[in-house]
Amino acid sequence: MELFHSFFWLISGILFWSMDNNNQNNPTNGFLKPEEKEFRAFYKREMWWVNHQVGLRKIGLGIFIVFDLILVLLAGWFFIDAYAVSFDQEKNSVISMVSSGLSELRDFSQSEAAKPLGVGEVAVVSSGDDKNYDFYATIANQNTDWYATFKYAFKMSGGETAELNGFILPAEERPLILFKAATTKTPSVELIVRDVKWYRVDPHEISDYPTWFADHNPQISEAVFSRADDNNQAAVAFKIKNQTAYNFYQPSFAVILWRGGTLGGIVRITAASLESGEEKVLSASWLGAAPSITKIDVYSEINFFASESYSSPEGIQSNDTRTQIETK
């Protein structure tokens, strides 16, 4: 009986030891707390990294070396191809591209550049005393967003006249005149225009030039020509109304008189000033035989882009460089 009890306790001990050992080797079979399970997972990950980090580093280094070798080989091939294999072909391609680019740039520049001024023929007319003659020519600007300043003179057989300053606004045609330029009757005359300087209308400041021009240009109307009964005195007059918001300093106007299609006379009239809202009649008269006039053209000679064309509004003081006197 005692032998049987001893054998029972021996078998029970062996089974208990076996179960305890299995629980230690396989903790998932036991009952673990949540924090113990989390620690167990963290422990497994760390052990995996410790066991494999050397191999992973070798793999990464190998990939990096292979990638660098590919880059070096590609760079070497491109260098050899550019300077040895395909050098002539690449050179010709570059020359062709540069030539094409320059051609396109030239075409673009020419399309955007100002078109040259158009110059008309010169007409000669008596100044009214049969001893001196006036010269008349026209100049045209076909550019709608460019205006220009220039110098002009009239060339005759005896040489050139003195140079005068001129200007022309966008999309404008205006006369160029010179009074008492010659004493020889109907000389052969040619207009010379030089030192042309172009200025583009800034679209940021003037987005609509026709409207801007209308806002600056005084209205001219009721131009009439008359002569005395004895035909020894002639006169011309017109009405000028400054409906703009600007005051003009010594504005001048060129009056061209036509007898049919022939130039009959040239007159320039200058006012001392023209205030905003002012309306006045400007006139001029001269002695001498006057032909029958059938048409009168009046041109404003105000350069609306020049600051010296304007005067300060009444009540605003300013330093006018035209009347400044230097004192010591």
Image: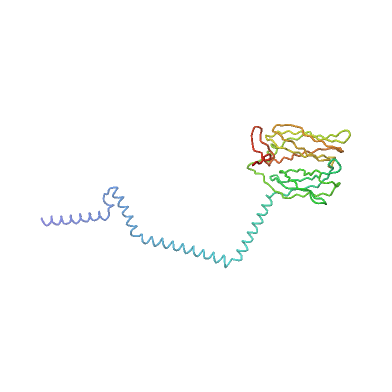
Q: Residue furthest bottom?
A: 84
Residue drawn 33% across the image and 55% down it: 46
Q: Position of residue 130 (x, y in %)?
A: 86, 42
Q: Nearer the viewer, residue 111 or 212?
A: 212
Identify the colour scheme used. rainbow
Q: Position of residue 156 (x, y in %)?
A: 82, 50
Q: Nearer the viewer, residue 99 or 327?
A: 327
Q: Residue furthest right?
A: 230
Residue drawn 65% across the image and 57% down it: 102
Q: Position of residue 280 (x, y in %)?
A: 75, 32
Please tell me how many numbered marks the rendered image carries.
Answer: 0
Q: Residue furthest left?
A: 2
Q: Quadrant of the N terminus?
A: bottom left
Residue drawn 27% across the image and 48% down it: 33
Q: Quadrant of the C terminus?
A: top right
Q: Is residue 314 above or below residue 52?
A: above
Q: Nearer the viewer, residue 316 or 44?
A: 316
Q: Quadrant of residue 165?
A: top right
Taking the image as shown, residue 150 lies to the left or right of residue 316, namely: right
Taking the image as shown, residue 69 lies to the left or right of residue 224, namely: left
Taking the image as shown, residue 115 lies to the left or right of residue 62, namely: right
Q: Quadrant of residue 128?
A: top right
Q: Position of residue 77 (x, y in %)?
A: 53, 65
